[in-house]
Amino acid sequence: MLTANSIFASEGVGVWDVACRHPAGRGAADEHAGSHAVVFVRRGCFVRSAEGGESLLDPTVAYCMRPGEEQRFDHPHDHGDECTSIALEPEPVAALWGGEPDLPAGLLPVAPALDVGHRLLLTAARRGEDVAERALELAAGALEAVDRRRVASGRPATERARRALADGVREALAERPGRSLPELAQLLAVSPHHLSRVFRAQTGHTIARHRMRLRVRAALDRCAEGERELARLAAELGFADQAHLTRAVRAETGTTPAALRAALSDPRT
């Protein structure tokens, strides 16, 4: 039995928690991939047959799926397996793979550090965090094992260019914090993966964290103005709900929106 649970979906990227409890033996040959994906094995062992070839999968390797690809999964053991699938829409696929609208066939070696990153991504996604950037970085890390130059083709070449790119992100988000990573990448003419990596190297935090900090600061402004409807405030500023707003404000400031409203509001209003 195969179960696939979506635990994150945003900005052309999805993260799926996949578990298979198929007994030992040959699988069905009528399974078709629904989207591009980079799949990391967390536990177990199985054989994937696709495009006339067979590959043995275990937690030391990853593989790519392509839309419509017919595949069969055979299981040498009864213990089942578990995987994490990073589903990608065509635009991030092309950005990751040097402009090509497809992903490579064959196995992708997974070094220990990459595997740890994969497991941390899964945990963060289960907690409800925005993991679009981390998922793209993880997929790029796996693809670099096949062709580092292709993955690096959209990377800014100089320090000045990298600094200008980070400034461009900050400027665009200052105007409209809701801009997604693909929108920013298109605006700045660079791949989403490299935009994320350059921004973090230049600022010390991710684009998602920067976006959240801008939203928290907007919330502080509204609190100072005496805003009392926190649910409405959360909806207007792009938070999932009031609880999400409270968690974000507490993480950034160490206190709650209500406490900050009391401390910041003008007693004359």
Image: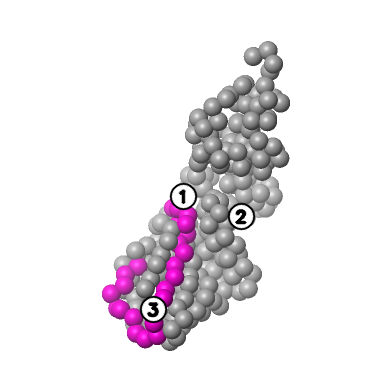
- In this rendering, position of residue 31 left or right of residue 136: left
Q: Which region shows up in magenta? A: 7-33
Graded by Cα atoms within 10 Å as few (under 14), some (14 to 19) or many (20 or more), the crowding at tag 2 reads many
Q: Residue at x 53, y 51 (%)?
A: 128
Describe the element under mark 1 as helix, strand or loop. loop
Magenta segment includes 24:
yes
Graded by Cα atoms within 10 Å as few (under 14), some (14 to 19) or many (20 or more), the crowding at tag 3 reads some
- In this rendering, position of residue 223 left or right of residue 237: right
Which of label 1 and label 2 is nearer to you?
A: 1
Residue 11 numbered tag: 1
Residue 65 position, x and y percent, is: 40, 69
Q: Residue at x 47, y 59 (%)?
A: 15
Q: Which residue is mark 3?
A: 22
Q: Amino acid at mark 1?
A: Glu
Residue 122 position, x and y percent, is: 54, 61
Marked residue nearer the N-terminal end (3 or 2): 3
Q: Amino acid at mark 3?
A: His
